[in-house]
Image (cartoon, helix red, strand yellow):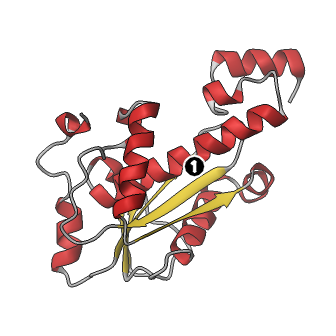
Amino acid sequence: MSGRHRHEQFGEIDRWASECGHALVAGVDEAGRGAMAGPLVAAAVILPTGCELEAVDDSKRLTPRQRERAYDEITDAATAWAVGVVEAEMVDRLNVLGATHLAMRQALEGLDPPAEFALIDGYEPSGIALPHRAVIGGDGLSLSIAAASIVAKVVRDRIMVRLDCVWPGYDLALHKGYCTQAHRDALERLGP
């Protein structure tokens, strides 16, 4: 199971946030930032204090089947979870970084109950008023960020499977819009 990938520090940042007196801490991460097609999706997940999820690890270390199983475990256990989706046209207008921060704000605003504090994967985001801490490589260090990375990835993958039906021939269900050789070949054959 995924626990074999974890290291001693996994979850320490979540404990730190809890020890600072924050009861409702949201982990926040995104999926789709490096894609050539499809939306950018961010998720925010609040887990109960002391929650342990065996199937959860950095989403990049999990197979699609493991992510689906972890997604179910996360959404069942979470105090709250929400996603923000920024469509490709808006990503083009805002740029990837601006779209990432917008999706993160949308996800945080969708939480019920709302978060008191956020642990956000990556560098310091702009426009997030909620008290937070940016954590580079957070999906490998924080349980709540790892949970958010899984939720964002599963939601985005499901969107890409639906888009594959709308745009047949590009194999979006297979490569999920990322810059693979198959995707580049389809673009050359069919156009953007």
Give the number of callouts: 1
Work out which residue is located at the far left of the displayed protein and give it: 8
Figure check: 18 above or below 34: below
The answer to whether residue 181 is left or right of residue 135 is right
**Point 51% across, 45% down: residue:** 153
Work out which residue is located at the far right of the displayed protein and give it: 191
**Point 23% across, 66% down: residue:** 14
Location of residue 108 in the rendering, given as x and y in whole percent from the top left corner: 51, 73
- The 10 Å Cα crowd at callout 1, few under 14, some 14 to 19, many 20 or more, is some
Disc 1 target residue: 155
- Quarter of the image with the C terminus is top right
Task: Evaluate whether residue 33 shows in this view.
Answer: no
Question: Which residue type carries mark 1?
Answer: Val
Task: Evaluate whether residue 14 shows in this view.
Answer: yes
Figure check: 125 above or below 112: above
Figure check: 43 above or below 5: below
Location of residue 169 in the rendering, given as x and y in whole percent from the top left corner: 81, 21
**Point 41% across, 30% down: residue:** 63
- Quarter of the image with the N terminus is top left
Figure check: 145 above or below 78: above
| Nearest the eye: 64 or 25 | 64
Write down the quadrant of residue 21 in the picture. bottom left
**Point 11% across, 48% down: residue:** 8
Mark 1 element type: helix
Write down the quadrant of residue 174 in the picture. top right
The answer to whether residue 92 is left or right of residue 126 is right
Location of residue 43 in the rendering, given as x and y in whole percent from the top left corner: 50, 60
Location of residue 51 in the rendering, given as x and y in whole percent from the top left corner: 22, 63
